[in-house]
Amino acid sequence: MLIKIAKPSDLRESDVTPESVYLSRRRFMGGLAGVGAGLALAGRAQAAASDYQDVPAGSPPAWFVSKLENAEWDSVVPADRQLDKLTPFEDATHYNNFYEFGTGKGDPARNADSLETQPWSVVIDGEVANGGRFDLEDIAKPSRLQERIYRLRCVEAWSMVIPWLGIPLGDVIKRAEPTSKAKYVKFETLVAPDQMPGQDSSFALIDWPYTEGLRMDEAMHPLAILGLGMYGRELPNQNGAPFRLIVPWKYGFKSIKSIVRISLVEEQPVNSWQAIAPDEYGFYANVNPEVDHPRWSQATERRLPNSLFNPNIIDTRMFNGYADEVASLYQGMDLRKNF
Ligand SMILES: Nc1nc2c(c(=O)[nH]1)N[C@H]1C(S)=C(S)[C@@H](COP(=O)(O)O)O[C@H]1N2
Ligand SMILES: [Mo]
């Protein structure tokens, strides 16, 4: 991501809390039932374990292997996804953004071996009745692994199509029993400079931990998942092992990696990129071809893999092509202000 020093932001609370946001909070507090209604779940993912024979085996923990045996390989996905070809595993694992391991696209693949992912525990806290520190295994246990083939569209105008393995984020949040004060979900990545050389660098722009957030109704949306794997195996370290967020209708920076803390909070969190440059990166970060980044167009994207002779530029779609499923979350909001 190209960096520009932040100008003071003049965004006021009234700009970011329009009536529709308030109303959707009310809807959440009125009960979670019906949030998934209207999700167009037609068509089937074509990938199955046998499609990933060329993908190098990892070294997953035993609990992940048994979840894999019971995975839903034919998880329902939006039908239009079938127009998109899977990005090869090699590209998805060697062209990454994971600043904890360096700012170059090849740095995460080069440096992320040092990350220790087993065991892994996660704190769930804040406005919840059922918080605490949990082993990742126990967080994942009650939910069946599902394959979800999603487009991933980076704010830098490149994109991929990745077959994730994950569990609905909403499952995990429900089990934590949010109180009526829980309006947002905040996520934090591990801080461990001994394992993450990018955190040691005096040039680091990010004030660690890398932080992200979602409005409660966004977090409960059935398309939002916690990813534990991809291409039929566990997540490679450079892709955010051992678990990460995946919100396919938002720019890639929302999909925070290697999560150690999930907090249910009352106030809208400030996410890392918003903190660095609030005039360039917002809280919502919904993919929107009509709202350009101040320094480049968001109308098109470069679909990986590509080359000099085949740049593979395609049109960017509203909400990354998931408008039928998610547009109602933002009804009445000014998406230019709430970028
Ligand atoms: N902790 C953390 N999470 C992160 C990032 C990061 O630098 N640190 N980069 C984000 C960005 S900008 C993108 S585009 C996606 C990239 O995910 P991928 O490397 O698996 O394709 O991860 C996101 N999650
Ligand atoms: Mo990104």
Image (tube, rainbow, N blue to C red):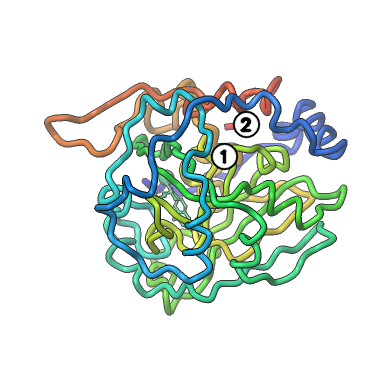
Seen at 81% across and 29% down, the residue is 23
The foreground one among 192 and 259 is 259
The foreground one among 187 and 29 is 29
Type of amino acid under label 1: Gly
The percent coordinates of residue 265 (x first, y second) are 76, 53
Mark 2 secondary-structure assignment: loop
Seen at 57% across and 46% down, the residue is 225
Q: Which residue is labeled 2 in the image? A: 338
**Residue 300 relative to residue 125: left or right:** left
Q: Which residue is labeled 1 in the image? A: 282
The percent coordinates of residue 272 (x first, y second) are 54, 53
The foreground one among 239 and 18 is 239
Graded by Cα atoms within 10 Å as few (under 14), some (14 to 19) or many (20 or more), the crowding at tag 1 reads some
Measured Cα–Cα span from mark 2 to mark 1: 7 Å
The percent coordinates of residue 121 (x first, y second) are 60, 72
Mark 1 secondary-structure assignment: loop
**Residue 96 relative to residue 14: left or right:** left
Disc ID at residue 83: none
Q: Would you place residue 50 above or below residue 30 in this image?
A: below
Type of amino acid under label 2: Asn
Along the polypeptide, which appears first: circle 2 or circle 1?
1
**Residue 326 relative to residue 158: left or right:** right
